[in-house]
Amino acid sequence: MAIGEGKTYTIPIGPVHVGLKEPITAWLQVDGERIVDVRIRPGAIHRGIEYMARERNPIQVIYLAERICGICSFAHIISFVRAVEDAASIPVPPRAKYIRTILLELERIHSHILWAGVACYTFGYDSAFNLGMLLREKVMDVLEAMTGNRVNYGVGTIGGVRRDITPQVAGAIEEMVEYYKREFSYFYNAVTEDPIVKARMRNVGVLSEKDAVRYCAVGPTARASGLRVDLRWSSPYEAYEDLNVEPIVPQDYFGNAQGDVFDRFFVRVMEVYQSLEIIEQCMDGLPEGPIMHEPKPAKLLNLLKTADGVGQSSIEAPRGDDTHVIKLTQAQENVTWWKVRAPTYANAMSWPIMFKDQEIADAPLIINSIDPCISCMERMLIVNEKGSSTVATKEELIRICRDKTRRLMHR
Amino acid sequence: MINKMLFINIKQFFKKPFTNLFPLAHIPDHLLAVLKRVKSGEVELNPPVPTPEGFRGRIAYDKDKCIGCRLCVRVCPANAISYITEEKKIKVHVDRCCFCAQCTEICPVQCLSMSNEFLLASYNRKEQVVVGNN
């Protein structure tokens, strides 16, 4: 290909690609090996979940919310039930709050170790990938012992949790924390001390602090750019109110934050250690008491039927802020409307910045570096009567969006 | 590069594989032929990993106990439970079930429960319907 002639070629990555875990298309404009521009085209995995919620009552929607994402399923549930609790003013017993926190942190550990392993796999470090998978098995076992499932735990409910921490599970959690404190450093050292890994990740996909603010990056992506953003720290929820969670930023360890793929890797690995600490603290301070505000689901449904209003909740999912907004109407059993903003949607905006002047070979690594969850993100697809899909312009989308709000206001 | 991970990798060569080879160690050429030989006792199947405590498998339904209150129909997220008006009983479509156990929790007479059965794939859709004992 011609280099430096100002002539560019377009290369698509995706919608289905070995370097990607989920379907999304990145159209790369390349000049030789250098990426000049990129256009991200989502739309391959839209499922209409928000629409489906409108013919279900809040208890049914819990399981729908769980299926938005396979990895951060519990984060989505908690965000959803917190929004419902906000709308219906349902209190949560303290023990349930602690159990929720423990589960959220277990999920964060499993998500981050999976991501770290897959990142190694993306650039061909397969032994580290396999070691990551081996390490992840321990936290999956604990989740299985606690909830009966490995993914989609199905233990969250409005006003509490459905499964208690038995002494047996407490023992398993304690053993897991010890195991990770002992074994996780092998993985961390193997990856961070390897010169090839450093060469592949340092100064690749840089997102500066200024750009991270401008493009509203969230979660570990923003923290790797040096921003102290963490909802567990800035607006604590559940048991985080009693704990002191500090956001992990690379400048505390290296002196400065470069905002590259290595920093994102580092932030996630350090967050695994932070999560272990939080779990330990929660296990020590686990209060006694009931785990549900209303143990009878039939009564809970009647209680929710009397609720009226809009509830909102933002929590720190493994990938960033996960926001759910819900409207419940009095005397109406079903959810009136429900809106989800998953963290990937905010992070995907900064992809074009990260891609600028990088090589094509780094593209899958950069795409993976924000830990994208495409199924979380896809909320918008327009299909016309003939069945072909079109891309709506910004003005059109705003108009449609406002029309919908107006329609719902009149209901 | 020499590090701790290298030793872990080398150790793996001498360890038994962690994976439970269920149901057979190798994929057979003809699955149905193997299943026939299993019946006659020529071949033995590897047992699956035991299910954890609190596992949610195929729903078990005690039809006699059921009072037909329809609460489970109301709470099922997957519309897997249909109500039989003439009998005032229900039937559960396991192929639609998402195994959340919300119906067993809401049932006022505890006629629904989650069993440990998890090998549910079949060619026959009628096998996927739980109609209860009789």
Image (cartoon, coloured by chain):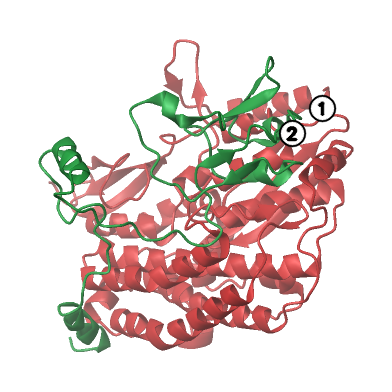
Question: Do marks 2 and 1 share a chain?
Answer: no
Residue of label 2: B71
Left or right: residue A19 compared with residue B51: left
User: Which residue occupies the foreground of this view, A131 or A256?
Assistant: A131
Chain that is coloured red in the picture: A
Badge 2 element = helix
Label 2 Cα crowd, 10 Å radius (few <14 / some 14-19 / many 20+): some
- Residue at the extreme left: B29
Which residue, given by chain and number where applicable, does mark 1 sit on? A409
Q: Identify residue type, mark 2.
A: Leu
Which label number is shown at residue A183? none
Badge nearest the viewer, 2 or 1: 2
User: Residue A104's spot in the image, x, y percent?
Assistant: 60, 65
A110 left or right of A14 in image? right
- Snapshot quadrant of residue A11: top left
Circle 2 chain: B
Mark 1 belongs to which amino acid?
Met
Q: Nearer the viewer, residue B113 or B99?
A: B113
Q: Position of residue A62 (x, y in %)?
A: 65, 45
Q: Is residue A34 visible?
A: yes
Secondary structure under the numbered disc 1 in the rendered image: helix
Q: Vertically, is A267 above or below A344? A: below
Q: Residue at x 64, y 27 (%)?
A: B90
Q: Nearer the viewer, residue A16 or B52?
A: B52
Displayed quadrant of residue A302: top right
User: Where is B82 relative to A343, above or below?
Assistant: above
- Please name the residue shown 24% across and 83% down the image: B8
- In this structure image, what is the colour of chain B? green
Left or right: residue A287 compared with residue B82: right
Distance between the alpha carbons at the discs numbered 2 and 1: 31 Å
State the image coordinates of residue A237 (x, y, percent, origin top left): 74, 66
